[in-house]
Image (cartoon, rainbow, N blue to C red):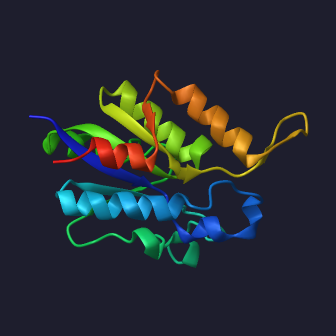
């Protein structure tokens, strides 16, 4: 029997800090909330990944406000939270074991940010044999400066990251496409 789970990666207050610079897709959290509401109505499992830093100066340090999961996608009763210290939600956590124990064969990934923890978790999900969906409008990216000092706009980063994942590591869908696809 196939089962599908929703994984929400690093949707934490830390990403509200100005240090990240320009961002694309300001509707990402709204779309995550739409998916989450639909997911809960359908009775599918919801899994959270929360980045935890050991550095007291980090926005992701547990005693800092940035560690908190954003209210718009706050975990509900019985929903699982895995904390991680690296980019992948699978490394240093029991996520893979949890998915297998609960017969979850398909995963839908949303979260922050597209080129970092979302991409890494998506790649590992696929490499571990899970049928993986990444929701293009329920994730976002920030602009980045490369090794040559060239600035890449958030829209470029987001688009290129999705392109590198498309068909090789995940099926890329929009929120609307997912909601239509995942009906009981």
> Could you tell me residue 143's position as x and y percent?
76, 49
Which residue is painted at 33% across and 49% down in the image? 179
**Seen in the image, is 178 located left or right of residue 72?**
left
Quadrant in which the N terminus is drawn? top left
Which residue is painted at 45% across and 76% down in the image? 71
Relative to residue 69, is residue 176 depicted above or below?
above
> Could you tell me residue 93's position as x and y percent?
35, 48
**14 and 6: which one is in front?**
6
Asked whether residue 64 appears in the rendered view, the answer is: no
**Seen in the image, is 166 located left or right of residue 151?**
left
> Could you tell me residue 55's position as x and y percent?
61, 64
**160 and 31: which one is in front?**
31
**Seen in the image, is 171 located left or right of residue 114?**
left
**In this view, which residue lies farthest toward the right?**
149
Relative to residue 35, is residue 88 depicted above or below?
above
Relative to residue 147, is residue 49 depicted above or below?
below
Which residue is painted at 64% across and 70% down in the image? 16
Which residue is painted at 51% across and 38% down in the image? 120
Q: How many marks?
A: 0
Asked whether residue 90 appears in the rendered view, the answer is: yes
């Amino acid at each position: 029997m196939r089962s599908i789970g929703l994984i929400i990666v690093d949707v934490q207050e830390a990403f509200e800090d100005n240090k990240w610079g320009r961002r694309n897709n300001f509707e990402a959290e709204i779309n995550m909330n739409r998916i989450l509401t639909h997911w809960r109505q359908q009775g599918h499992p919801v899994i959270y990944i929360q980045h935890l830093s050991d550095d007291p100066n980090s926005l992701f340090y547990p005693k800092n406000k940035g560690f908190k999961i954003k209210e718009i996608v706050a975990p509900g009763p019985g929903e699982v939270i895995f904390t991680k210290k690296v980019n992948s939600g699978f490394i240093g956590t029991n996520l893979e074991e949890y998915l297998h124990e609960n017969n979850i064969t398909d995963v839908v990934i949303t979260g922050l940010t597209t080129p970092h923890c979302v991409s890494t978790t998506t790649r590992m999900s696929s490499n571990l044999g899970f049928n993986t969906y990444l929701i293009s409008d329920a994730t976002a990216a920030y602009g980045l400066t490369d090794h040559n000092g060239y600035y890449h706009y958030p829209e470029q980063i987001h688009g290129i990251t999705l392109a590198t994942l498309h068909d090789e590591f995940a099926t890329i869908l929009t929120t609307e496409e997912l909601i239509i696809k995942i009906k009981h």
